Image (cartoon, helix red, strand yellow):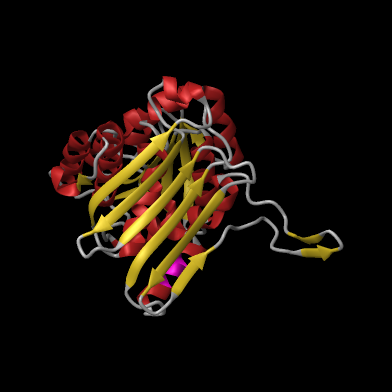
Amino acid sequence: MTVRFGLLGAGRIGKVHAKAIAANPVAKLAAVADAVGKAASDLASAYGAQVCTIEAIEKAGDIDAVVICTPTDTHADLIERFARAGKAIFCEKPIDLDIGRVKTCLTVVKETKATLMVGFNRRFDPHFAAVRKAIDDGAVGKVEMVQIVSRDPGAPPAEYITRSGGIFKDMTIHDFDMARFLLGEEAATVTAQASVLVDKKIGKLGDYDSASVIITTRDGRHCAISNSRRATYGYDQRIEVHGSKGMVAAENQRPVAIEIANGNGYTRPPLHDFFMTRYTEAYANEIASFIEAVEKGRKAHPSGEDGLIALAMAEAALRSVREGRTVKMSEFDL
């Protein structure tokens, strides 16, 4: 079986997913839709696809699945639309910025029995997945403490910030999902601090560019997250898990894994410049997992429910910053 895809959105992340689909031997990028005609035609021609409207993709009997890479405020409507059309759906995070809207959307997904996967690609990174396997194999014993460092090389443009939902719902949401992935237990409380240290324009838009979060589970395990919109040395992505028997860590990755030693000391090449190159394998593995779920008719993971919980954790972090308190996850009706 070849899974034929319609891609909604030909921007930066759309290009990443188009590449992953094209590289998969059992997938075919059949159609591309984007509000910007040239963006759609350029991407479609690169992979032998057709430029189509969203309506045409919705009605197409030969398209099995869609990948939603449009702006966040369109995600929930498109998920419902394609669930009713009988298509399998892969949607970039988040489903929506409002918890109530996400819950309504997931009700439609459940009623239509649609396959829905939410794009938390970091679960599929080989290095992070190896950390999870080490935990599952008992190599570090019972997980006690997790540290996640996620720092972007630079801040996004103001136009993006106004639609993204802010640092917690756009950036940290990946780390909230990773915290759940590594802790193996749901969060009980979220405590956050956030500041504007990189760009004052971000603060004027009501957002933050530097954040620290502490997540605590019911059993007392905790995860510390460090975020920044500025890392002068590259795309900083590290995790560490400390357990009762030891520790496992995934360090930063580089395009070339070499080390040079001479009279000036030891040097290594720079880090990846951003997610497009750092997580190439993760995106490929993510699409492969989605295709397998479609082929086998099983529930896809990360699921819509995973997206809902990560969004609630982001909302808890934002509430913690604004109200200056620790927020209990029981405050959210999930």
Q: Residue at x 40, y 28 (%)?
A: 207
Q: Residue at x 45, y 68 (%)?
A: 131
Quadrant where the N terminus sits is bottom left
Q: Most extreme residue toward the front, as rendered?
A: 324
Q: Would you say 255 lies left or right of 3 here?
A: right
Residue 68's spot in the image, x, y percent? 39, 38
Q: Would you say 180 lies left or right of 153 here?
A: left
**Residue 277 visible somewhere in the drawing:** yes
Residue 236's spot in the image, x, y percent? 56, 50
Instruction: Looking at the picture, tell me which residue is in the foreground, 161 or 228.
Output: 228
Instruction: Looking at the picture, tell me which residue is in the foreground, 119 or 37.
Output: 119
> Exactly how many numbered labels are in the figure?
0
Q: Residue at x 50, y 33 (%)?
A: 10
Instruction: Looking at the picture, tell me which residue is in the foreground, 326 or 116.
Output: 326
**Residue 293 visible somewhere in the drawing:** no
Instruction: Looking at the picture, tell me which residue is in the foreground, 21 or 96.
Output: 96
Q: Is residue 249 magenta-colored? A: no
Residue 4's spot in the image, x, y percent? 42, 48
Q: Residue at x 58, y 40 (%)?
A: 153
The main secondary structure of the magenta stretch is: helix
Residue 112's spot in the image, x, y percent? 17, 45
Q: Which residues are magenta?
A: 129-133
Q: Would you say 217 lies left or right of 332 here?
A: right
